[in-house]
Image: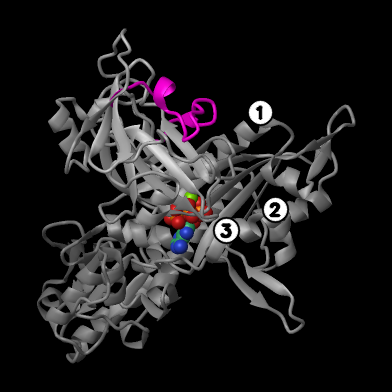
Amino acid sequence: MRLSRYLLKTLRETPADADTANHQLMLRAGMVHQVAAGVYGYLPLAWRALQKIERIVREEMDAAGAQEVRLPALHPIELWQESGRAAGMGDILFKVKDRRGHELVLGPTHEEVITDIVRHSVRSYRDLPLILYQIQTKFRDEPRPRSGLLRGREFTMKDAYSFDAGSEGLDRSYQAMAQAYRNIFDRCGLQTIVVEADSGAIGGKDSQEFMVTAAAGEDELLHCPSCGYAANVEKAAFKKLTPGTTAERPPREKVATPGCATIRDVAALLGVPPERTIKAVLYTDETGGLVFVCIRGDLEVNEVKVKNAFKAKDLRPATDAEIRAVGAVPGYASPIGIRREGVKLAVDDSIVSSVDYVTGANQEGYHYRHVFWDRDFMDKDGKPWLGSAYYQDFAKAQPGHGCPKCGLPLEGSRGIEVGHIFKLGTVYSESMGARYLDTAGQEQPIVMGCYGIGVTRILASAIEQHHDEKGIVWPPAIAPFRVYLVGLNLEQEAIRREADALYDELDKAGVEVLYDDREESAGVKFNDADLIGLPVRLTVSPRNVKQGVVEYKVRTAAKADLVERQRILEKLTPSA
Ligand code: ATP
Ligand code: MG
């Protein structure tokens, strides 16, 4: 391709509104055009790279035995009502109305549509297993579209769905997809780690995410360098050590703690370590109910775990008025003596019955000490909370906490989720009636899995992971072209002939070349070559032509080599 004829306008300056390296570089390298927030046009350079990614994805999916389909982007809302997600997905769903006033959804994912197809086509165990996939545009009204293609409102996803008779079949399909995913990301040149993921309010069983390690990632990850445990912070567990237990149970006592509204102040005043205090963290859910979380003073709450436990769609910090309305006092709150109506109590399992704690007394400037949660957590009417409280893990794992498997300290990092595999089980087949007849002729729900890859997000994260101060450093397999051919002083007829001839020779041999035949200075051309970042740069210049050589530079190498003109093609084939 001749650059003089190509739609590619590079920018010297970094666009002010682009916050991440991939977004800045994609704009500067003329790859994308933003049409609206989170909506992009992919220009020729980006489209070539995306097609390469799609080819890799297709090859690996086909090799794993999956069959390609293409499902519609317009879905009747009734399908989403059947699964319960018309409401469950909240404002993420784009909805449109047709001329008759019928509501439709612009597909953000395709579990509903594929389950509808399969329930009409699968009859018996003989029709299973099946893995179906597609590469398609998805629509999600993201609250914060950002970072260019990393989080769009319209983006390309590869989504696959498996259908099995029984959970062993699902395990096999899941493993096949997990292996295909590892192959895809390896071939795309991405360093990923696989982490245990939250499976959300849907429930489901195993779920893992493939994370591109990058500082710009929105996801917080924890991993154990000793045993290999790795999880998204949304899901991560850790070893909770119990501070000194006591055999005696002194009676609860109210103590004045004036001006001590933080755990640290109270702990210091009363001379107890923060892990012997209980703090209250209060939320309001979408129904207006109060979610009252009690957790050890030295720990933080993991809101995802809270949301899942109560199947809450939305949680926000409770206001002072909402806290007071149930009889609790902000800064001095505990479940002791509050109203029960409209309150959901969550007690983190870091709080154990053998430890003597300090907690709020629901009175300005007062705390209780010698609180044993199983004994002292009573409501306003003296009825114990024990039994009605949700008692489980609600805590956020942090770097330094003990690994849940081996106990050694966890390390933290950031990642970009590029893929997600998920054992759905029978959630959709039950809600939507997708069944098969087993060998005994009995109807059974089909056991499903779903598997997603962000194709456009792969492109963005590849750039996020592979760039330097000069520009993009393409992983070879997804580079839009293999070679950037720079012609210098092309106004000299003899040089232009040489450069044109080299371009034609490579092009005929099937080497993908972007030929910079523009009337620009050497400086501009070399800067653009680095910015666009193709794996190899070749330079034809008057001096090189005189010596019968071509300058050959690998994007990642510090310096260039001179290669005999006749040996260039040989050096570039077979392709790297
Ligand atoms: P996230 O947590 O980043 O919002 P998700 O968990 O909602 O993503 P999935 O439903 O698991 O996403 O979608 C499958 C894949 O699609 C993700 O792993 C990701 O690579 C990609 N993806 C999801 N949302 C977006 C988006 N807004 N823009 C680009 N890619 C996306
Ligand atoms: Mg996901």
Q: Is residue 554 above or below residue 497?
A: above
| Spot occupied by residue 30 in the image (x, y as percentages of width and height) | 32, 78
The reply to whether residue 45 is visible in this rendering is yes
Between disc 1 and disc 2, the foreground one is: 2
**Quarter residue 508 falls in:** bottom left
| Spot occupied by residue 109 in the image (x, y as percentages of width and height) | 59, 58
Q: Which residues are magenta?
A: 369-394
Which residue occupies 83% across, 32% down? 438
Disc with the residue nearer the chain's start (1 vs 2):
2
Q: Which mark is residue 168?
A: 1
Q: Could you tell me what secondary structure mostly forms the magenta stretch? A: loop
Between disc 1 and disc 3, the foreground one is: 3
**Quadrant location of the C terminus?**
bottom left
Q: Is mark 1 within 8 Å of ligand 1?
A: no
Q: Report helix, strand or loop for mark 2.
A: helix
- Number of other residues with Cα within 10 Å of mark 3, as a class: few under 14, some 14 to 19, many 20 or more: few
User: Label 1, label 2: how many angstroms apart (C-alpha)?
Assistant: 25 Å
Q: Is residue 557 above or below residue 146?
A: above
Q: Name the residue carrying label 3.
A: 89
Camera-side residue of 521 and 427? 427
Q: Name the residue carrying label 2.
A: 83
